[in-house]
Image: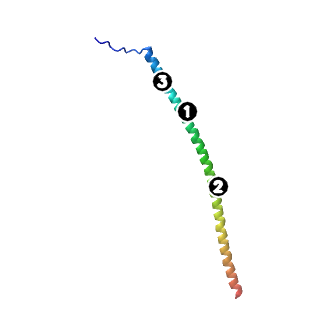
Amino acid sequence: MSVPPNPEPTLSDVLDRIDGLATSVGKLSTSVGRLSTDVDKLSTDVEHLSNDVGQFNERFSNYQQATQWGVQLVFTLIASATITAIVTTVLKK
């Protein structure tokens, strides 16, 4: 006759499960530490990118202002040349 399995866990079974849980918690703690490190690195990267965007915005603003001044200079020179040509033509007659 066969002996039916004992449904009650033994102290050894409980200790094995506790050891398994301790190992799982250790792995989880390592993963959380790694995740924290990754988040810190990403935060630093975002800060660097934010600074780069600020520098780009400043350069773009300078470029835009220089372009605007250049366009104004060109129109002023064209207007001056036109007025000079008209005045010269009128005074010669």
Residue, x 60% and y 42% (percent of image)? 44
Coordinates of residue 34 in the picture (x, y in percent): 54, 35
Residue farthest bottom in this picture: 93
Q: Which mark is residue 58?
A: 2
Residue at point 58%, 38% (across, down) = 40
| Residue 51 point in image, percent of width and height | 63, 48
Looking at the rendered image, the disc whose residue lies closer to the viewer, 1 or 2, is 1
How many angstroms separate mark 1 from mark 2 (CA)?
A: 38 Å
Tell me the element at label 2.
helix
The furthest residue to the left:
1
Establish if 30 lies above or below 82: above
Distance between the Cα atoms at labels 1 and 3?
Answer: 18 Å
Tell me which numbered mark, 3 or 2, is placed earlier along the sequence.
3
- The mark found on residue 17 in the picture is none
Q: Position of residue 5 (x, y in %)?
A: 34, 15
**Residue 41 drawn above or below residue 81:** above
Q: Is residue 8 left or right of residue 64?
A: left
Q: Callout 1: helix, strand or loop?
A: helix
Q: Of the two numbered discs 1 and 3 on the same chain, state the one appearing first in sequence.
A: 3
Instruction: Mark 3 vs mark 2: give the one in front.
Output: 3
Residue position marked by numbered label 3 in the rendering: 21
What's under tag 3, amino acid-wise?
Leu
In the figure, is residue 10 to the left or right of 64?
Answer: left
Q: Nearer the viewer, residue 8 or 11?
A: 11
Q: Residue at (63%, 64%) from the top-left corner?
A: 67
Residue 50 location (% of width, % of height): 61, 48
Q: Secondary structure at mark 3?
A: helix
Location of residue 17 by image quarter? top left
What is the crowding at mark 3: few (fewer than 14 residues within 10 Å), some, or many (at least 20)? few
In the image, 25: left or right of 7?
Answer: right
The residue carrying mark 1 is: 33
Residue 41: image quadrant is top right
